[in-house]
Amino acid sequence: SQQGEEDPQALSIQEGENATMNCSYKTSINNLQWYRQNSGRGLVHLILIRSNEREKHSGRLRVTLDTSKKSSSLLITASRAADTASYFCARGGAGGTSYGKLTFGQGTILTVHP
Amino acid sequence: NAGVTQTPKFQVLKTGQSMTLQCAQDMNHEYMSWYRQDPGMGLRLIHYSVGAGITDQGEVPNGYNVSRSTTEDFPLRLLSAAPSQTSVYFCASSWTPRGEGYTFGSGTRLTVV
């Protein structure tokens, strides 16, 4: 499988704290994306970072990408109970038969306690 | 509302039965995919399409067929259902060839008994 690893598998924090999730991958990528999934729902696109970028921000989200280490992290600052969800990283393939396809990790379950 | 529509939301099949999971999008997206989600496995790509008439296999294509006769529709056919196909199925679409920012449907929960 081309799936990478996400850690931690589960994360439990208090409201107001920061949450950091990590994603590693094995093959070359064109981009790396993060998605959120609330229980029983579809996935929602949060943020995308391209292979030539190192850091990106969107509201309370900060994503970093280190292509030399084949890893990315998602930071959610000042977390809220509504942030409780599963978070997935997805790698956009770099070329050939991988072009345009997304490969997902197994996800991190985030629980934010009020 | 613009988006990806999947039907049905729930389905129970007997082993050996066939059925089609419907997926339609109204955003004029060229790129569409089918994923299955199993506990502890994340999402795995079943089939993929880069436009009408063009499909490609993903990571787990066995037991599934797809066709893309129009830009809007991308149905997934289970040829002969097996208990191993019990899963939640998601359809997704994107407007870019680099797989950027896919929009997902709400899923179809399939149980094969």
Image (spheres, helix red, strand yellow):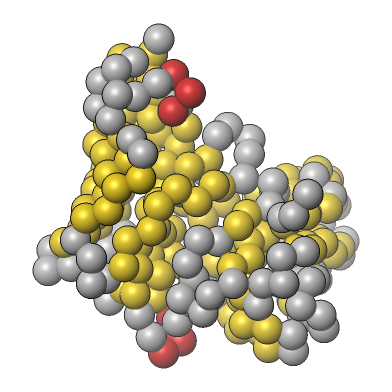
Report the front residue among A99 and B66.
A99
Quadrant location of the C terminus of chain A? top left
Name of the residue lying farthest toward the top: A114
Let me know if residue A64 appears in the view: yes
Q: Position of residue A74 (x, y in %)?
A: 28, 44
Residue pictured at 68% horizontal, 88% vertical: B54
Asked if residue B107 is positioned above or below residue B82 in the image, the reply reads above
Side of A43 where A73 appears, left or right: left
Quadrant location of the N terminus of chain A? bottom left
Side of A105 where A63 appears, left or right: left
Residue pictured at 74% horizontal, 85% vertical: B52
Q: Position of residue A27 (x, y in %)?
A: 28, 74
Residue pictured at 50% horizontal, 61% vertical: B101
Q: Position of residue A99 (x, y in %)?
A: 45, 82
Residue A42 figure quarter: top right
Q: Position of residue B95 (x, y in %)?
A: 59, 72
